[in-house]
Amino acid sequence: MATANVRVQCSICNKGNTTYICRGCSNDFCFQHLTEHRQIPNRQLDEIINDHDQFQQTIIQQKQNSSLIQQINQWEANSILQIQQTAKECRETTMKLTQKSINNIEKKFTELSQKLKEIRQENEFNEIDLNHFQLKLKHITEELLKKIQTKKIKFQQFATTVAGGNGEGQKLNQLNGPQGIFIENDKSIYIADTENHRIVKWKSNSNTGQIIASGNGKGNQNYQLNDPIDLIFDKNNNSFIVSDAGNGRVIRYFDQNQQIIISNIVCYGLTIDKNGFIYVSDLMNDEVRRWKQGDIKGELVAGGNGQGNSLKQLSFPRGVIVDHLGQIYVADRVNNRVMRWCEEDAEGKILVSGNGEGNESSQLYGPTGLSFDNEENLYAADEYNQRIQKYEKL
């Protein structure tokens, strides 16, 4: 690197001792400073090697990222393929079920047409026969309309609070574990305020409710309730029917007067349809049954496949209501969702929520009571959020 150069001054200390010239920078250095000067290229070389190693690591990372991106792309392609395959299977199943329903209706219509043709040819009929055929045609028409309208019913997934929402408590602007609800034509809401052991009424757009039954503390006297769970309105008798679960009874209310109509039963959800049939949610068996007058056990109409979260199952079902098409809506409490079951279907459909427990407007946390208003908007009592949620029909 350097050669001796006698009596030339060092470029660092300016001394005229024996010096050495650096061929790299053409400067002269004494032995001491020559040694120090040689360390500078060494450090620079170390920096270059370090930069090289860092760049090499970057290349390796880029190769790894490229491999990871390839994996993500492959995962995306596989997922899309699986989704498309599942969607195809669902479409085929839906088309088969729809076609099967239409075929059944068409078969009934063909049979009716044949009978009408026969009596016309035989000219043997009377008013009773005509009424029978007219009723038969009406039932077939209603069945077809029901299948068509079922597909159109949807609700918004974000709700507004219309009662409570002021925390847990017993004040008139508060609820405590609300469960069963009923909506009047003027949109007044009747609520089974369970933990307050009372029935309250909230008028539309009101900030407070009013007590219409009990409110005298927990008890089993005629003027008391013990954990009322659900309530319905019987138009034929102009009365409310309340599930007084804590007292193991079902009570009919005429104004402030009450009558025990079922004893020794723990009922967690009930409703009545246009025919006067009563629907009861069986908490222990995760099912809903329809009871006609004189029934001993009732007919299974929802669930009944053990506790679970599949579309064939319920988990601690609570509130139950039936619409004008005979479709059954169930507050699937532990699954934090509202299910809809159509007659003769093997499984239900998630109607609202199903997004896990929470307090967002698209979520429920322990849904209990359900009801419709006269515009067919759906209401749900959201127990652990201490609020009533309204889902507007689309």
Image (cartoon, rainbow, N blue to C red):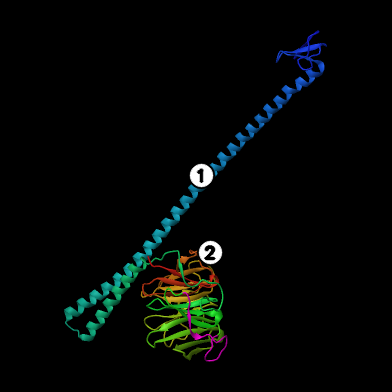
Decide which of tag 1 and tag 2 comes sooner along the chain: 1
Label 2 Cα crowd, 10 Å radius (few <14 / some 14-19 / many 20+): some
Spot occupied by residue 334 in the image (x, y as percentages of width and height): 54, 70
| Region rendered in magenta | 207-225
The residue nearer to you, when weighing 192 against 338, is 192
- The residue under label 2 is which amino acid type? Gly
Q: Which numbered disc, 1 or 2, marks the residue closer to the eye? A: 2
Q: Residues within 10 Å of mark 1 (few under 14, many from 20)?
A: few
Q: Quadrant of the C terminus?
A: bottom left
Check disc 2 and report the residue beneath it: 356
Q: Main secondary structure of the magenta part?
A: loop
Q: Is residue 217 magenta?
A: yes
The reply to whether discs 1 and 2 touch (Cβ–Cβ < 8 Å) is no
List the single residue furthest toward the top. Answer: 6
Q: Secondary structure at mark 2?
A: loop
Residue 318 point in image, percent of width and height: 50, 76
Is residue 56 shown left or right of residue 372?
A: right
Does any portion of residue 336 appear in the rendered image?
A: yes
